[in-house]
Image (cartoon, rainbow, N blue to C red):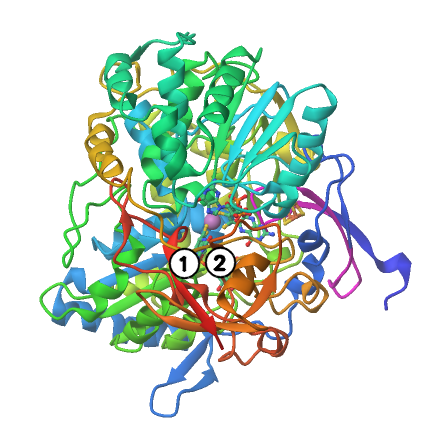
Amino acid sequence: MAPITQSRTHLRTCPLCEAVCGLELTLDADDHVVAVRGDQNDPFSNGFLCPKGASFGQLDEDPDRVTEPLVRDRATDTWRRVSWDDAFDYIAEQFPAVVAEYGKQSAGAYLGNPNAHTVAGMLYVPMLLRALGTKNIFSATTADQMPKQVASGLMFGDPMAVPVPDLDRTDYLLMLGANPLESNGSLCTAPNFPGRLKALRRRGGRLVVVDPRVTRTAKIADEHLFIQPGSDAYLLFGIVHTLFAEHLLDLRIEATGLDELRAAAAPFDPPTVAARTGIPASTIERLARELAAAPTAAVYARIGTCTAEFGTITQWLVDAINALTGNLDSPGGAMFATAAALGIVRTKPFRTGRWTSRVRALPEAMGELPVATLADEILTPGEGRIRALVTVAGNPVLSAPSGARLDTALAQLDFMVSVDRYVNETTRHADVILPPPRPTQSPHYDFALLRFAVRNYARYSRPLVPLGDRPSEAAVVARLAAALTGAPHSAADGADPMAAADELVIMGLLQKMQLADRRDELLGEDTTEQRIDLMLRIGPYGDWNGGTLNLRTLLDNPHGIDLGPLQPRLPDVLLTTSARVDLAPQQLLDDVSRLRSQLTTVAPEMVLIGRRQLRSNNSWMHNIEPLMGGSNRCTLQINPADVARLGLGDRAVVKSAAGTLTVALEPTETIMPGVVSLPHGWGHSQLTHTVARAHAGVNANVLTDDSVLDVPSGNAVFNGVPITLVPA
Ligand SMILES: Nc1nc2c(c(=O)[nH]1)N[C@H]1C(S)=C(S)[C@@H](COP(=O)(O)OP(=O)(O)OC[C@H]3O[C@@H](n4cnc5c(=O)[nH]c(N)nc54)[C@H](O)[C@@H]3O)O[C@H]1N2
Ligand SMILES: Nc1nc2c(c(=O)[nH]1)N[C@H]1C(S)=C(S)[C@@H](COP(=O)(O)OP(=O)(O)OC[C@H]3O[C@@H](n4cnc5c(=O)[nH]c(N)nc54)[C@H](O)[C@@H]3O)O[C@H]1N2
Ligand code: SF4
Ligand SMILES: [Mo]
């Protein structure tokens, strides 16, 4: 260990989940992270740190990560390290050749979750997608929050206009399908979510949690309600029905569709939906009355309700209830954040289905096709079949439905490139892996997550550790975009794809704002920083927009800047044609008949749901020794009554329409009878990295079924999957 005098301290944002906590890192003279603490002076996270953040150092330099470009020999399935130039030359030779032979649509792309956390993912990947010019774009969004974005897009006109519960001021929080005590929150950026919930209760507020499991969050709540998986839309319609029936409305915003919403809710009276949800009619009515009576209240629903068959209807009704009870866009209710960096400027009302997928004719949403049809697009012969694939920061073999089928599909590609820090279950099929640098070598700004924050806040972190002679991830992605399209990509040809791309974006934006003469004033050490500076300066707090913020302000305030509590933002955020909130979008009304058709369906005897684990991060932190073991294991939670009824032992064979797994059982009273829960992101038996393989677990998505979708959003369905269980 280096002498203490040589160590230095650095501040940066944790990139590992949506909570954006401030970290205080101690680095030794050789640039190794030797200590991690929560940044006490961060005005948003106030020193909060979870076990994942605490292991940032181990993650930063995981000895099993990929550090140099790898090329796979297909004949022997072995990897060889190559130089960056050789890697890009090889890509430039192979990828465009496939596209030249089979056409633009033969290229595909899959983007994983960490793209929402990286500067490369937010600023450079969109450019790579444009360069490819294919419709075959997929991402973790359609295995995650697409229902919320489609619902927001249809109600508010903008799929990025997602209201978040005003956690610090609300008097009543109804939370469905979220477990922030383990996940630390999602589409609700709130460092120290646990502390904020405890504070809500301390100030006399009420927390009600609806979940098929008694989660850690449920344990600190005033009330927990079991719900039959996949039935949240019925519960929420029951609440909407009651609000109308009992004249509990307090609509304070300009809205259309009130009568249509009332009509849509008519068939879903609490006695009718009670059987389907497993929640008594009297409880549903009481929830409606409590929401209406509370001085302020917010309904918040997350992944458990998104990755379900009626995900979009559910997300719509969440904000419909917030609106009907006078809580939309109002302090203590559900509000829109004001992010400091200017985002994509949309001008047209959102719609889906501008094109459809080739095999199943599924509509696009936000320029993407459902990941549930990625395997179809690779496996189904015909013109437009995907033959060359790029993945950036994703592991769809473990994260997409019917993962085993996708595994088979990837093996049939003509060429595949992945930008990823590991050889994982997905990237093992790649021909080339391009690694990002260590997180300490990357800049950090939360372009996406700060749009969904419970306080307005901004923080920029510069890289702490020099890159040496390797490229930044931004430069990798920019160079990849050039190589994939056969454009000049190498310094030897005089090309600097990153600088060229940045210049295009910067000048485009400046010209649009009629600020072209101010190019030289942009601050920053490189063109990436200059882009960030520009987005801040013309953003809502920017010094070119009447405010004070720019890159310098953020560099001078390394703990982050508090920009105050959320402010009412209607009608400014709206992009609907009526310039009002649409409480009953036609596309969602059309889906209600599908919901009605299943109202009296008898629930399957056993259904599968997922869960998150405090010391996991989807599929990719299982190689970090200090996080492993204890409760961080891949077990099937099951009620002891079901274990006894089915005569099961320690293990069981689980069968679904999509596949079969043998799993270790974890009997627990915390899960309702008839429901089992398996976390996703496990199934590492094929990996070479040592720790993860020792804790392999099984791939939950062998059981989930890519033929079942939430119709309006095309989102995958992970919760409420019918299964059978027999002794192993
Ligand atoms: N059954 C079931 N399935 C699910 C879910 C569920 O609840 N149940 N949840 C879904 C959800 S919400 C999500 S978001 C998806 C996640 O799905 P994916 O995004 O496909 O999977 P991750 O496991 O997050 O994989 C992230 C990859 O990014 C790599 N990586 C990490 N940091 C970086 C970086 O800085 N740069 C680059 N280039 N790569 C990096 C990691 O090594 C890893 O391979 O899974 C979904 N799948
Ligand atoms: N520690 C940790 N943190 C993470 C992640 C991680 O893997 N580990 N992943 C990150 C990602 S990508 C995301 S998207 C977020 C997600 O963050 P959250 O939305 O908080 O996700 P979960 O913790 O899985 O909580 C979902 C809950 O939904 C419940 N549920 C399942 N089916 C249903 C249903 O039909 N109805 C209802 N009402 N509930 C249901 C489950 O039992 C579970 O408790 O977490 C992020 N943070
Ligand atoms: S809660 Fe999320 S952001 Fe905060 S330290 Fe943990 S992983 Fe990092
Ligand atoms: Mo996610």
Label 2 C-beta lies within 8 Å of the nearest ligand 1 atom:
yes
In the image, residue 18 lies in the stretch drawn in magenta: yes
Residue 255 picture location, percent across and down: 31, 12
Task: Identify the mark at residue 477; answer none if there is no mark.
Answer: 1
What span is colored magenta in the figure?
Answer: 11-35
Q: Amino acid at mark 2?
A: Glu
| Residue in the image at 46% along x and 32% along y | 535
- Measure the alpha-carbon separation of dots 1 and 2: 6 Å
Residue located at (53% from left, 70% from top): 648
Q: Residue furthest bottom?
A: 76
Q: Which mark is residue 473?
A: 2
Q: Is residue 684 above or below residue 590?
A: below
Residue 112 is inside the magenta segment: no
Q: Secondary structure at mark 2?
A: helix
Instruction: Residue 419 in the image: state x and y as whole percent.
Output: 43, 64
Within 10 angstroms of label 1, few (less than 14), some, or many (20 or more) residues?
A: many
Q: Position of residue 682 (x, y in %)?
A: 52, 67
Residue type for callout 1: Val
Left or right: 430, with 620 as reference point: left
Question: Which of the numbered marks, if any, corresponds to residue 394?
Answer: none
> From the viewer's perspective, is 312 left or right of 206?
left
Q: Are marks 1 and 2 in contact (CB under 8 Å)?
A: yes
- Residue 52, picture quadrant: bottom right
